[in-house]
């Protein structure tokens, strides 16, 4: 193997290492889509939501949710991801509120 080829290979390896290190600080996301229907009948699609923090749903809340991400989520009736009234929604599944039930108003990602 020539010196030039070794130098090129080493340079490529160093650049790849820097590229991976530079991307590792970016926010992680739940790959896929979260689709929900609001209490007003509007359809909302969220693509690759962050895995960090509490996420508020539309002001009218959600009555039907489809989790087509690669991670599980927890739905809450409160706007701050708190309270006993929550629903665990696994990846690639959906859930609807019961007739007369309160809509979901926020969600968090299980990671």
Image (tube, rainbow, N blue to C red):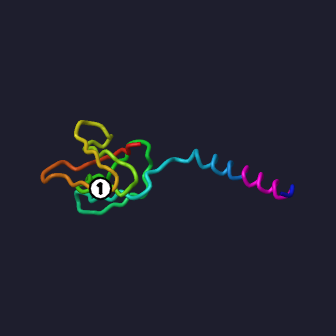
Instruction: Please name the predominant secondary structure of the magenta segment in the image.
Output: helix
The answer to whether 31 is drawn above or below residue 73 in the figure is below
Residue toward you, 74 or 8: 8
The answer to whether 108 is drawn above or below residue 44 in the figure is above
Query: Residue sitting at 46 percent across and 50 percent down?
Result: 29
Residue toward you, 107 or 111: 111
Q: Residue 47 at what x, y percent from top left? A: 42, 58
Q: Residue 88 at what x, y percent from top left? A: 28, 45
The answer to whether 77 is drawn above or below residue 37 in the figure is above
Q: Residue 105 at what x, y percent from top left? A: 28, 48
Q: Secondary structure at mark 1?
A: strand
Question: For this view, does 107 lie left or right of residue 101?
Answer: right
Residue toward you, 23 or 16: 16
Extent of the magenta region: 4-14
Total of numbered circles in the picture? 1
Q: Residues within 10 Å of mark 1 (few under 14, many from 20)?
A: few
On the rendered image, what quadrant is the N terminus found in? bottom right
On the rendered image, what quadrant is the C terminus found in? top left
In which quadrant of the rendered view does residue 83 lie?
top left
Residue toward you, 33 or 71: 71
């Amino acid at each position: 193997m020539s010196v030039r080829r070794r130098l090129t290979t080493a340079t490529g390896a160093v650049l790849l290492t820097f590229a991976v290190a530079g991307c590792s600080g970016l926010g992680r996301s739940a790959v896929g889509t979260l689709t929900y229907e609001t209490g007003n009948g509007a359809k909302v699609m969220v693509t690759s939501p962050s895995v960090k923090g509490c996420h508020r749903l539309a002001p009218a809340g959600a009555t039907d949710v489809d989790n087509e991400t690669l991670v599980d989520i927890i739905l809450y009736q409160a706007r701050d991801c708190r309270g006993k009234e929550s629903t665990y929604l696994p990846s690639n599944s959906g859930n609807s509120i019961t007739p007369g039930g309160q809509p979901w108003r926020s969600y968090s990602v299980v990671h």
